[in-house]
Image: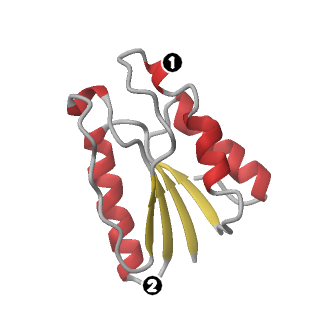
Amino acid sequence: MNICLINPFSKLAAIRQYNLAKCFAKLGHKVTLILPEYDKYSGYKKNLFEECSNLTVIHPYQIKSKCIEISMAFYFFSALHKIKNKKFDLVHGFRPTPFSGYLGYKISNKKKIPFI
């Protein structure tokens, strides 16, 4: 199964989502994890998550700013662009925020797949 996991823009949630993605990948699923490179909770340090077999990590473009609206100005469109040629069976939004929830909805709607 091809799974797209979307993180709700915080490092703590990213760690949980990354571990979930690794477990799915170890079970043989192909997983794409979309998460920010940095956030206000990490002190704007880059989050380094390694790819492994069956796991691709995508970091959409972000502007380094404490204002989330500015930080995420290009995030949404960058994420859509980076996954436009990927095929998924489902999209999972981990505790969706307005940004990640809407992104998951748009991906599932465009690709006509379930959004969980």
- The 10 Å Cα crowd at callout 2, few under 14, some 14 to 19, many 20 or more, is some
Q: Is residue 49 left or right of residue 102?
A: left
Query: Mark number for residue 69?
Result: 1
Taking the spot 34% from the left edge, 63% from the top edge, the residue there is 20
Q: Secondary structure at mark 1?
A: helix
- The 10 Å Cα crowd at callout 1, few under 14, some 14 to 19, many 20 or more, is few
Q: Secondary structure at mark 2?
A: loop
Pick whichever of labels 2 and 1 is earlier in the sequence: 2
Colour theme: secondary structure
Taking the spot 47% from the left edge, 34% from the top edge, the residue there is 62
Distance from the alpha carbon under mark 2 to that under mark 1: 37 Å
Reply above or below: 107 against 65.
Answer: below
Residue 51: image x %, image y %?
Answer: 35, 68
Taking the spot 38% from the left edge, 80% from the top edge, the residue there is 53
Quadrant housing the N terminus: bottom right
Query: What type is the residue that disc 1 sits on?
Result: Glu
Reply above or below: 37 against 62.
Answer: below
Q: Indicate the quadrant where residue 99 lies.
A: top right
Q: Indicate the quadrant where residue 26 lies.
A: bottom left
Number of numbered discs overlaid on the protein picture: 2
Residue 29: image x %, image y %?
Answer: 49, 79
Quick one: 63 or 53, which is closer to the camera? 63
Is the C-beta separation of discs 2 and 1 under 8 Å?
A: no
Residue 89: image x %, image y %?
Answer: 65, 69
Q: Is residue 109 left or right of residue 10?
A: right
Query: What type is the residue that disc 2 sits on?
Result: Gly
Choose mark 2 or mark 1, whichever is in front.
1
Residue 9: image x %, image y %?
Answer: 40, 36
Reply above or below: 64 against 52.
Answer: above
Taking the spot 28% from the left edge, 41% from the top edge, the residue there is 11
- Residue hosting label 2: 28
